[in-house]
Image (spheres, rainbow, N blue to C red):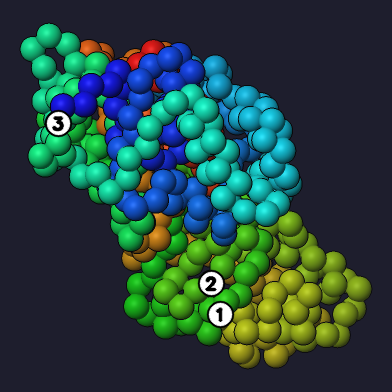
Amino acid sequence: MQEVDVVIIGAGASGLMCAIEAGKRKRRVLVLDHANKAGKKILMSGGGRCNFTNYTVEAENFLSENAHFCKSALSRFTQWDFLAMIHAHNIPYHEREHGQLFCNESARDILNMLLAECAKAGAEIRLNSELKTVIQTAGSGYLLSLGKEKIKCQSLVIATGGLSIPKMGATPFGYKIAEQFGIHVQATRAGLVPFTLQLAEKEKFAALSGLALPCTISNARQSFTENLLFTHRGLSGPVVLQMSSYWHKGELINIDLLPAVDLQQALLTAQKDKTKVKLKNYLLQFFAKRLTPLFIANDLLECSLLDLSHKQIQLIAEQFHHWQIKPNGTEGYRTAEVTLGGVDCHCISSKTLEAKQVQGLYFVGEVLDVSGWLGGYNFQWAWASGWCAGQYV
């Protein structure tokens, strides 16, 4: 039987960060993962460039049933702390829109940094390890069974992530451990995920597949302005991914396809200037040619601006500024970037990440009911929660 101080289940972003910090405290750390490689989701993130954090990180960028839970960890290990690690390892990076930070070269730079820090801290990483059972021992600590092998530890950290992208090895293991120890798990669903459309609308908008344009999507609770992408399955792009985390099945969403222009005023001004151009040609300055016939009838598109009534102009503007659509659903965990819901944060200490009623059991990262916006926020939560737990395990 192997005896260590800390076992961390999951060699992803939060698990590796926790291993580094616990190792620095001279704790004997063993990281177990059922995958054949550490940090698989790190490597595939951000198109292989890893959007590892954001210049602006606030509690408002996260969703949780316990809205204040994330504040403690985020304040103690900030984006600037992670950037200090990046600088220490001379990893080149760049900023994109909305303060998003990406590696210049490869996400592997981030993973190599974490693995190097783990090695430096003396943390052991064991892959292809399938955990069979977890038992809390009579004294204190845990007994883990990996088939014939048994491992004893004082602290057990669950860093198994959520259900997103099952082909990368996502499982509900972390939730099952929580439930085994009587810890409530909030209902889960896919977040940061494309919308699918009802069959009739899917067929109607199929001609727009591949078209992207800036728009504002809103509902009663949230609003985002970013690029929308029409796909052969429905709607995607950053603005859709962001809104998907705030959308519930059966709910309408409002889409403004021209948020930067008051189209009604623009048409009235063009009309006053005696512009004889046809409506279809006038709209080409704002929209792709293939988009306008799907929102405006052809006979109206053929009209000169001078022939349009004020009522018609108002209705034309509304078609583009107030497009209401009810998504059929989302693409689900297959393409979701995060899992909404998870281990109930009311049951976890925001300071230590330890379960309040179960000594020595910790939860970090995406397995918890904390989900960030698109833009590096989920990685920052992984770094912060892993770092904080690492101070106490």
Front one among 217 and 112: 112
Write down the residue under mark 1.
208
Quarter of the image for residue 342 reads top left
Can you tell which of label 2 and label 3 is closer to the viewer? 3
Disc sitting over residue 150 in the figure:
3
Q: Report helix, strand or loop for mark 3.
A: strand
Identify the residue at horizontal 48%, vertical 82% (top origin): 206
Q: What's under tag 2, amino acid-wise?
A: Phe
Q: Are marks 2 and 3 in contact (CB under 8 Å)?
A: no
Front one among 204 and 121: 121
Quarter of the image for residue 339 reads top left
Quarter of the image for residue 182 reads top left
Q: Residues within 10 Å of mark 1 (few under 14, many from 20)?
A: some
Q: What's under tag 1, amino acid-wise?
A: Leu
Identify the residue at horizontal 63%, vertical 84% (top origin): 290
Front one among 182 and 77: 77
Disc sitting over residue 230 in the figure:
2
Quadrant housing the N terminus: top left
Q: Are marks 2 and 1 in contact (CB under 8 Å)?
A: yes
33 lies left or right of 207: left
Placement of 107 over or under 135, stated as above or below: below
Q: Are marks 3 and 1 in contact (CB under 8 Å)?
A: no
Q: Residues within 10 Å of mark 3 (few under 14, many from 20)?
A: some
Q: Earlier in the sequence, mark 2 or mark 3?
A: 3
143 lies left or right of 23: left
Q: What's under tag 3, amino acid-wise?
A: Lys
Identify the residue at horizontal 56%, vertical 50% (top origin): 108
Alpha-carbon span between mark 3 and mark 1: 56 Å
Task: Give x and y (percent) for residue 12.
Answer: 41, 41
Q: Earlier in the sequence, mark 3 or mark 1?
A: 3
Q: Residue furthest top?
A: 139
